[in-house]
Image (cartoon, rainbow, N blue to C red):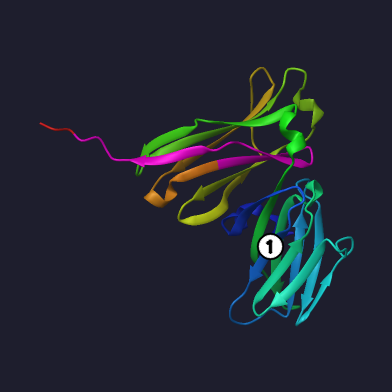
Amino acid sequence: CSLIQSHEFSHRISLTVADLGDNVTLTCSRSGDQPRFLFWHKLNFGNMFQRVAVGYLNRTTLEYPFNSSRFRFTKRHDVYSLTIRNVRKEDEATYLCQGGSSISMVFFNGTLLAVNDPKNQKKSVYVKQSPDVESVQLGNSVTLRCSLVYKKEENTSRCPGEHRVHWFRAGSESNPGIIYTDSTCSDGQEGRSCDYRLSKTIRESSDAGTYYCAVATCGQILFGEGTQVETKLGDLNWL
């Protein structure tokens, strides 16, 4: 299904980070002609695809097993909202909004929902980003590194199958958004880490900000602490 090809829609997927027990509202707005049908889908990190809710004209319906008191689907004017109460770790996924008619459906936007669990602070696998800060002249490229690191007693065979890393940027001029998704890594630290790299050209000052990586593995998503990318002036040679 072309809907789940994340590289096609990555520029329309935002990031929402919540703590366990929080209430979260995801929105999908459409100006102009309103879609006859609207769907919320849940794409789990294991690539399992579930339909969460259906909107038809002014009617909204939650699909099983989301038709519980924790979920609410509403339409107000041109905004379709999906609210998740008392958020749980299993709610962590990418939520996609799609609408249109029985003939043609269009992807509108999506949200990656990440759920922080304090119990996972002492986990046997973690994500490390480097460098902490990188200064670069406009027009030059920067290479960001992200490693999924296993402690000594662990090894990558505990979580078979490929991992998937999401890169996103948080800047002062825009909301956090996914900029790249990859599943290719190289072994590091004697097989105890899976290393990813992102090379990006910093073309303008708005490309600066904090770049984060998030690795989906073993049914959960683990976050790095970020790399701060700053722009600097070119070298000035004075006679």
Establish if 215 lies above or below 86: above
Residue 206: x and y, percent? 41, 52
**As displayed, is residue 15 above or below residue 54?**
above
Q: Mark 1 Cα within 10 Å, few/some/many (few <14, many 20+)? A: some
Tell me if I can see residue 132 in this picture: yes
- Predominant SS of the magenta segment: strand
| Residue at the image position 64 percent from the left and 78 percent from the top | 78
Residue at image location 43% in from the left, 34% down from the top: 134
Residue 197: image quadrant is top right
The image quarter in which residue 29 lies: bottom right
Which residue carries the number 1 mark? 26
Residue 7 in the image, given as x and y percentages of width and height: 61, 52
What's the magenta region? 212-236
Rendered view: 109 above or below 171: below
On the rendered structure, is 122 left or right of 203? right
Q: Secondary structure at mark 1?
A: strand
Q: Is residue 38 magenta?
A: no
Residue type pointed to by label 1: Leu
Q: Toward which corner of the image does residue 61 lie, by quadrant?
A: bottom right
Find residue 202 and report its horizontal and vertical position in percent.
41, 45
